[in-house]
Image (tube, coloured by chain):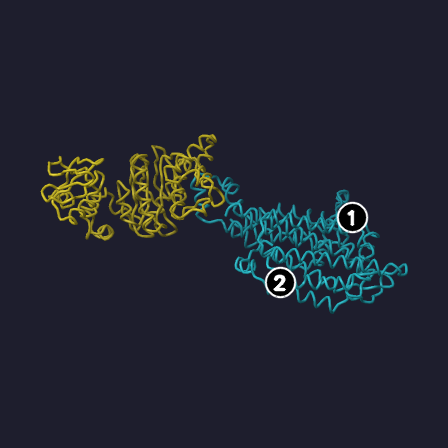
Chain colours: A yellow, B cyan
């Protein structure tokens, strides 16, 4: 649990961060979103005290971060930055082992942990442990950067534009990987980004910042449904908000019991009413994907498949209702 | 040797004809044609009469000349850089062999005080063969250990050749035999001057370099002072140090017991140390500056103390640049230490200045050649160390 109270940073006459407060519950992801210079990075860097606050409080699990010894505080906080900042003279394994080594773990424990993390980030330890950062692609370097940050299972993970330097395809893949790992590990994360899509994809709560203040802090859906006037509305973008809301929900949430109209014939699935072959949806697919498929296939209903058998169906009306304005 | 030239290396590896090698082969041949290979002198001091390479010793002269020309041509036509390097070394060896044989022949029936010195033809042809070999080795881009092995082999071959007695008729070797004790003392003295100035230079320069890196105020004060020190002529520096040191010893005579005096080793060591500071400080600053900002911030954010960050991250990353500065200092001080003899500081300068006093050029050479050799050895060793450090992390 992180509680930030009335946190302020002045650089001379300029106020970079102006008395902001928020809290992040254990296992949740908070995204700080805004344009360059809005104070989001400074806020993040005050939490591990790379920047000293001018006033205000940061409480981590009930302890005041400003009263803790600097190194001890930072050992307990994972940190990922845009430039990655891997140590170029150390191998991948040594990089990942940085914080465990600083904390004085035993060698066997460190080795086991490094292998576990490399596997978690889909980097074969046999191949990658001995490589140097310069031998890795940008995406691989960023994976190592995240693995290094969470190596000692910190109470808090801070990420500053973690995927910003990557090409769009690699970025999306890493975002998906990180979301999957986060679902399993339930880390407490503060993520700084200027990419609204990234925030919607990864965050449980989004704080929109401008000129050092938080303009609105809300769940992704609430932010889409009821954005404040002005800057928030511009940043969130209203044109495709229905689709964005749909992408926050999964097929599982609105699926109904299957009717008898679906027939499995070998590998293919037949819609008895139209006599056409159809591709089923997965239970974990987003409603955005479901909507796209419904429009493309020009049907009213699609089956939901799990391990080759029909476990339910999704109706177009239900999808439209999920993405639409609430009465 | 640490510099690699990828484009040329590629082009040179299989080409049947090397334009670069022409740069060495043509002057080599011209020098052999135009300048005397040896010079015969009735005694140690007078200037002598030149002997062309084809005129030396019965049999050796014409065959040797032809062989040298063939070797020079072969360095141009050789298809592989390794062959070029080998031919270059063979050229040096052959030139030396011819010179040794010629000297022996000239001295066979010469009067007692006669001397045979090496002439311009010998020096220039040797130098160009050696350059051709070094150039070829550089293009081969050998691994550091292989380079050290090659250098060790060449040094051993040279030592064996000198010890064989083949060159004993040369005036240079006669000077060595007459001054063997002084030579040994000069060698020790030179090592003391270079080593003894390097240690304090590192002890002061590394922390000062780090301080200048972190504090712009320290930089603003230190760097101009070091710049002035660096540009002070060495003789002036030695002279300027004599005054305060002499005054110091006069005030505290006890210091004399530690060997401190206005002249001698002490002012020489101080002067060399002062000359070392700017390269060490400048390279230390450059090394630290080259550490990426993100790397430093990542280290801090991960909970490293300043000291841990310095020891585990900043120093290892800055090390190759710092070591380059140390190499500059060592090579520079090997040369500057020669001047220390002027104030009684010892070293090979002793032989140089004694030779100049006696107008005995071969004695001057006896002091100069080891200085050049030491500088080359230092360069090879440091380059190998720096290269090893950088290859460890591709």
Q: Secondary structure at mark 1?
A: helix
In the rendered image, the vertical position of residue B76 relative to residue A145, given as above or below:
below
Q: Residue furthest bottom?
A: B34
In the rendered image, the vertical position of residue A318 relative to residue B371, given as above or below:
above
Which corner quadrant holds the C terminus of chain A? top left
**Residue B173 relative to residue B150: left or right:** right
Q: Secondary structure at mark 2?
A: helix
Cβ atoms under marks 1 and 2 closer than 8 Å: no
| Residue B130 percent across, percent down from the top left | 67, 58
**Residue A123 relative to residue A203: left or right:** right
Q: In the rendering, which numbered label is found on residue B32?
A: none
CA gap, disc 1 and disc 2:
45 Å
Residue placed most toward the observer, A47 or A176: A176
Tell me the residue that label 2 is attached to. B77
**Residue B310 relative to residue B153: left or right:** left
| Residue B29 percent across, percent down from the top left | 70, 66
Label 1: chain letter? B
First-in-chain label (1 vs 2): 2
| Residue A209 percent across, percent down from the top left | 28, 48
Residue placed most toward the observer, A128 or A190: A128
Residue placed most toward the observer, A103 or A51: A103
Whether residue A272 is visible, yes or no, is: yes
The residue at 86%/59% (across/down) is B107
| Residue B109 percent across, percent down from the top left | 89, 60
Nearer the observer: mark 1 or 2; the answer is: 2
Tell me the residue that label 1 is attached to. B185
């Amino acid at each position: 649990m992180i509680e930030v109270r009335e946190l302020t940073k002045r650089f001379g006459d300029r106020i970079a961060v102006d008395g902001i407060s928020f809290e992040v519950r254990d296992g949740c992801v908070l995204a700080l979103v805004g344009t360059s210079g809005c104070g989001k990075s400074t806020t993040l860097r005050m939490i591990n005290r790379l920047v000293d606050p001018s006033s205000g409080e940061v409480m981590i699990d009930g302890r005041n971060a400003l009263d803790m010894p600097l190194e001890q505080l930072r050992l307990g906080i994972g940190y990922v930055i845009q430039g990655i900042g891997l140590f170029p003279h150390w191998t991948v394994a040594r990089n990942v082992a940085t914080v465990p080594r600083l904390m004085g773990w035993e060698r066997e424990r460190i080795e086991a942990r490094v292998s576990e993390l490399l596997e978690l980030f889909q980097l074969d330890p046999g191949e990658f442990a001995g490589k140097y950062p310069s031998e890795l692609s940008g995406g691989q370097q960023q994976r190592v950067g995240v693995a290094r940050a969470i190596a000692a299972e910190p109470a808090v993970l801070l990420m500053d534009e973690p995927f910003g330097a990557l090409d769009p395809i690699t970025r999306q893949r890493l975002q998906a990987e990180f979301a999957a790992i986060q679902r399993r590990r339930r880390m407490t994360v503060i993520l700084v980004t200027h990419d609204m899509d990234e925030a919607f994809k990864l965050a449980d709560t989004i704080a929109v910042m401008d000129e050092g203040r938080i303009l609105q802090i809300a769940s992704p859906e609430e932010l889409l449904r009821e954005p404040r006037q002005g800057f928030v509305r511009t940043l969130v973008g209203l044109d495709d908000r229905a689709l964005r809301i749909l992408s926050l929900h999964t097929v599982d949430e609105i699926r109904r019991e299957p009717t008898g109209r679906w027939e499995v014939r070998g590998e293919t699935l037949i819609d008895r009413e139209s006599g056409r072959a159809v591709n089923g949806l997965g239970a974990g697919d987003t409603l955005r994907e479901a909507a796209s498929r419904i429009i493309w296939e020009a049907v009213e209903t699609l089956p939901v498949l799990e391990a080759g058998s029909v476990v339910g169906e999704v109706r177009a009306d239900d999808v439209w209702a999920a993405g639409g304005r609430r009465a | 040797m640490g510099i690699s030239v990828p484009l040329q290396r590629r082009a040179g590896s299989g080409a049947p004809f090397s334009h670069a090698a022409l740069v060495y082969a043509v002057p080599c041949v011209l020098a052999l044609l135009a300048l005397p290979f040896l010079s015969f002198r009735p005694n140690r001091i007078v200037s002598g009469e030149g002997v062309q390479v084809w005129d030396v010793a019965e049999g050796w002269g014409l065959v040797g000349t032809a062989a040298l020309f063939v070797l020079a041509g072969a360095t141009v036509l050789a298809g592989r850089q390794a062959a070029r390097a080998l031919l270059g070394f063979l050229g040096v060896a052959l030139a030396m062999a011819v010179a040794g044989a010629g000297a022996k022949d000239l001295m066979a029936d010469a009067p007692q005080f006669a001397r045979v010195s090496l002439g311009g033809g010998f020096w220039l042809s040797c130098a160009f063969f050696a350059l051709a070999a070094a150039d070829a080795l550089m293009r081969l881009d050998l691994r550091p250990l292989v380079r050290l092995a090659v250098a060790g082999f060449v040094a051993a071959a040279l030592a064996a050749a000198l010890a064989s007695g083949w060159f004993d008729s040369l005036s240079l070797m006669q000077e060595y035999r007459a001054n063997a004790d002084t030579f040994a003392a000069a060698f020790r003295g030179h090592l003391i001057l270079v080593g003894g100035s390097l240690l304090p230079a590192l002890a002061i320069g590394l922390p000062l370099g780090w301080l200048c890196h972190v504090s712009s105020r320290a930089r603003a004060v230190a760097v101009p002072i070091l710049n002035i020190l660096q540009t002070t002529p060495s003789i002036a520096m030695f002279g300027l140090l004599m005054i305060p040191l002499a005054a110091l010893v006069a005030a505290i005579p006890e210091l004399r017991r530690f060997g401190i005096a206005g002249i001698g080793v002490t002012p020489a060591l101080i002067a060399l140390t002062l000359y070392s500071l700017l390269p060490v400080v400048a390279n230390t600053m450059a090394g630290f500056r080259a550490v990426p900002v993100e790397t430093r911030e990542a280290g801090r954010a991960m909970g490293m103390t300043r000291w841990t960050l310095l020891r585990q991250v900043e120093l290892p990353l800055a090390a190759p640049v710092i070591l380059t500065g140390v190499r500059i200092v060592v090579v520079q001080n090997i040369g500057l230490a020669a001047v220390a003899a002027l104030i009684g500081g010892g070293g090979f300068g002793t032989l140089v200045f004694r030779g100049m006093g006696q107008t005995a050029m071969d004695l001057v050479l006896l002091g100069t050649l080891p200085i050049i050799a030491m500088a080359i050895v230092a360069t090879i060793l440091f380059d190998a160390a720096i290269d090893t450090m950088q290859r460890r992390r591709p």
